[in-house]
Image (cartoon, grey):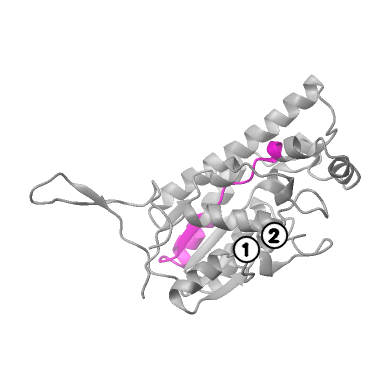
């Protein structure tokens, strides 16, 4: 069996004749079709070239051996596995329902979701998606998926800590230049060298918004029942460095970053049956 127990997974209590009850978790059958949903992170954007998606290096559905995605790990168990990547660079929670409908049409019985960075990465704080709206969109998407593919397993990865990106990159002149000239995630990365009170507080508010997105996504997942699992905040808490970030923009995960995403999410996801 691959993976580890999640709090969302329902435990079966088995009473032993001469001992206390023990928790047993039923492993999930390996899916036949998986679909990756989300934004540029799941498309492998800037992981292999200048401002292009590199689907082969996606943490979810890529086929690059070094990344060792969910797709490759599950295919290693099943032998065969069909995969689709419906993630689109720039997507926000507003786009998730449309991607879910594509996953339903593809009959995906395993769906990965990573969405929210672009809800927070706006020109101004006022433009960020509200927490309530993010939750409504997540609920609508999961409800549609449950109705369209009742047997599908859903995995939701947490949004990375955007403030950590600022922390690890603020001392790098190239990173500061890319963030400023490219106007990348200005809610968090504007004025990257500034330690003024207003900028410190702004970054804290944006981080709090991302944390709220992750909290609401986890609650929406829990409401869906044992067919939904999360990474328990593993990606948000992962201590990534600039070595995990593309040098094309100092924002998106590079090959090493995608590999770390795959490792962390798969470890904290479903327990899967090994049919061999």
Task: Give the vertical position of 113 relative to 215 (above or below).
Answer: below
User: Separation of disc 2 and disc 1 at Cα?
Assistant: 7 Å
Q: Residue furthest top?
A: 197
> Does residue 141 appear to the left or right of 56 in the view shown?
left
Secondary structure under badge 1? loop
Q: Which residue is mark 1?
A: 67
Residue 201: x %, y % from top left: 73, 24
Residue 4: x %, y % from top left: 41, 53
For the image, the number of numbered tags is 2
Q: Quadrant of residue 161?
A: top right
| Residue at (48% x, 69% y) in the render | 74
The residue range painted magenta reads: 141-164
Identify the image quadrant of the N terminus: bottom left
Q: Which residue is mark 2?
A: 255
| Residue at (83% x, 55% y) in the render | 248
Mark closest to the chain's N terminus, 2 or 1: 1
Secondary structure under badge 2? helix
Q: Find out whether the residues at labels 2 and 1 contact each other: C-beta distance under 8 Å.
A: yes
Residue 215: x %, y % from top left: 53, 39
| Residue at (74% x, 52% y) in the render | 252
Q: Residues within 10 Å of mark 2 (few under 14, many from 20)?
A: many
């Amino acid at each position: 069996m691959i993976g580890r127990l999640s709090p969302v997974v329902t435990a079966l209590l088995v009473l032993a004749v001469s001992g206390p009850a023990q928790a047993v978790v039923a492993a999930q059958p390996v899916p036949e079709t998986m679909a990756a949903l989300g934004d540029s992170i799941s498309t492998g954007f800037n992981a292999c070239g200048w401002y292009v998606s590199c689907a082969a290096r996606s943490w979810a559905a890529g086929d690059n051996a070094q990344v060792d995605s969910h797709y490759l790990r599950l295919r290693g168990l099943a032998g065969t596995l069909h995969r689709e990547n419906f993630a689109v660079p720039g997507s926000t929670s507003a786009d998730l329902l449309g991607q879910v409908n594509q996953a339903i049409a593809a009959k995906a019985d395993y769906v990965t979701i990573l969405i929210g960075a672009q809800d927070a990465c706006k020109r101004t704080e006022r433009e960020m998606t509200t927490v309530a709206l993010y939750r409504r969109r997540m609920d609508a998407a999961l409800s549609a998926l449950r109705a369209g593919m009742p047997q599908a397993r859903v995995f939701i990865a947490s949004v990375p800590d955007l403030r950590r990106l600022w922390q690890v990159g603020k001392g790098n002149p190239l990173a500061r230049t890319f963030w400023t000239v490219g106007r990348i995630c200005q809610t968090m990365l504007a004025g990257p060298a500034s330690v003024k009170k207003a900028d410190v507080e702004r970054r804290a508010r944006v981080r709090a918004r991302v944390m709220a997105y992750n909290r609401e996504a986890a609650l929406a997942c829990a409401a869906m029942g044992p067919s939904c699992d999360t990474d328990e905040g593993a990606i948000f808490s992962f201590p990534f460095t600039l070595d995990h970030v593309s040098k094309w923009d100092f924002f998106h995960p590079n090959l090493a970053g995608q590999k770390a995403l795959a490792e962390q999410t798969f470890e904290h996801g479903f327990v899967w049956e090994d049919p061999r």
